Amino acid sequence: MRGFLPKTKASGAGIVGLSRRGALLGLALGAVAVTLPHAAKAEWPERPITVVIMYGAGGGTDVVLRTLTTEMAKATGWTINVINKPGAVGGVATSYVLDKPGDGYTWLGAANYNKFVRVMGHSDSKAWEDWQYFQAANSVGSWSVRPDSPFKSFDDIVAAAKAKPGTVSISTSGAGGLWQELAAIVAQASGIKLKYVPYKGGKPATLAGLQGETDIAGGGVHEHIEFLRAGQLRHIQQTSTDDIVDEKAGTLVSVGNLVPSLKSSLPLGGIYNLAVKRDVPVDILKKIEAAFKTAVESDAFKEVAEKQYFTIDFRTGAEADKRAAQVEAITAATFTELQIPGAKSPSEIGLPSPGEFDKWWPPEGYEPRM
């Protein structure tokens, strides 16, 4: 503490000329010098967090992420604002969040580990290098038609598409997006070609089919179920492993019972994630992870999952990194095989074929962030 005391005269009795007030001032200054650096480090978060959802309001991704972030806010007291930035199958939102600082205040409300953006050339970001993902749940795809549609069954659609290839239209959540991928997989297995009409998200795609803009409404069971229950849409097929029996909508037939060659590939559907830039400090990532896990386990989210026929599947850390790379490899291979315009092959984006993935992972230089 001597560095903070005024000079004094020395005597046999020790230091003299130092008042009590001066001594107290010196002690106080010393205390400030010791504690100030610690006091200046505020607890994160100091301000509101923004979640940028990559698809439009009202779709499956939007419903899931808004439910989860609401539960995270309830559990922690954080202020979390949610905005939607659809476009380029997630590319618009991805670029927006990547341009923000790695301080943990801007998150990406993602789906499918953002696997389409590199495959379709909308971004160069690698899921397991630029992002830390937190997975909540899975969904399954659905085809539905209007009640007055001439297509009464899956076989009717197949027959019409074979008679006039490329004329039967189906709405999708975006060019090169999830519902186009799943529709293409089903079409290929059935030996038909469809006309894919892109919209900005699953809800607009569903509404397009409902309004007769396309012959088939593409999307997820969760996006179709209320219209099926109300009799505004008629079910054709869904991509879970088994038939789904709904009290109001009736039996939703698994495509595996219609196209046996697809059985081993089921279920096919969406994956719902939250993504944070990977350069965010680990202590902040761990806080986000803990809050996210609490939200996934909440009664409110379990209720949404049950109502929408989601399967809860919580993954973080290295497990999420591996899954992100794996689904991207599958999509790149599928889109290349189906000759989706603009799609890049696995080798073009530095990935192995799906069959070689387990031998390839982890790639050279990979290190888990958490």
Image (tube, rainbow, N blue to C red):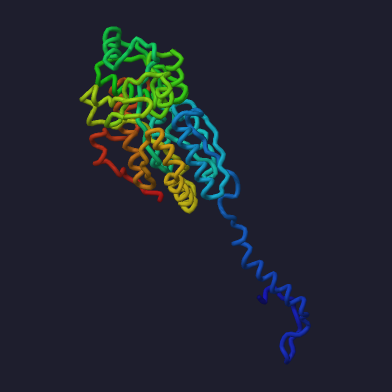
In the current view of this chain or complex, which residue is farthest to the left? Answer: 261
Is residue 305 rendered to the left or right of residue 11?
Answer: left
Q: Is residue 261 or residue 15 the one in the foreground?
A: 261
Residue 117 drawn at (x, y percent): 41, 30
Quadrant of the rendered image containing residue 312: top left
Q: Is residue 295 above or below residue 37?
A: above
Q: In this view, does 191 lie above or below 42?
A: above
Q: Which residue is drawn at 39% across and 46% down?
A: 316
In the current view of this chain or complex, which residue is farthest to the bottom? Answer: 12
Q: Which residue is drawn at 28% across and 26% down?
A: 254
Residue 126 in sight:
no
Residue 253 drawn at (x, y percent): 29, 25
Image quadrant containing the N terminus: bottom right
In the current view of this chain or complex, which residue is farthest to the top? Answer: 163
Q: Is residue 170 or residue 238 the one in the foreground?
A: 238
Q: In this view, does 304 lie above or below 6?
A: above
Q: Looking at the image, how many numbered discs can be counted on the residues?
A: 0
Residue 257 drawn at (x, y percent): 23, 25
Is residue 50 rendered to the left or right of residue 256?
Answer: right
Residue 95 in sight:
yes
Q: Residue at x 27, y 24 (%)?
A: 255
Residue 57 drawn at (x, y percent): 51, 29
Q: Is residue 200 or residue 9 the one in the foreground?
A: 200
Q: Residue at x 27, y 31 (%)?
A: 242
In the current view of this chain or complex, which residue is farthest to the front? Answer: 247
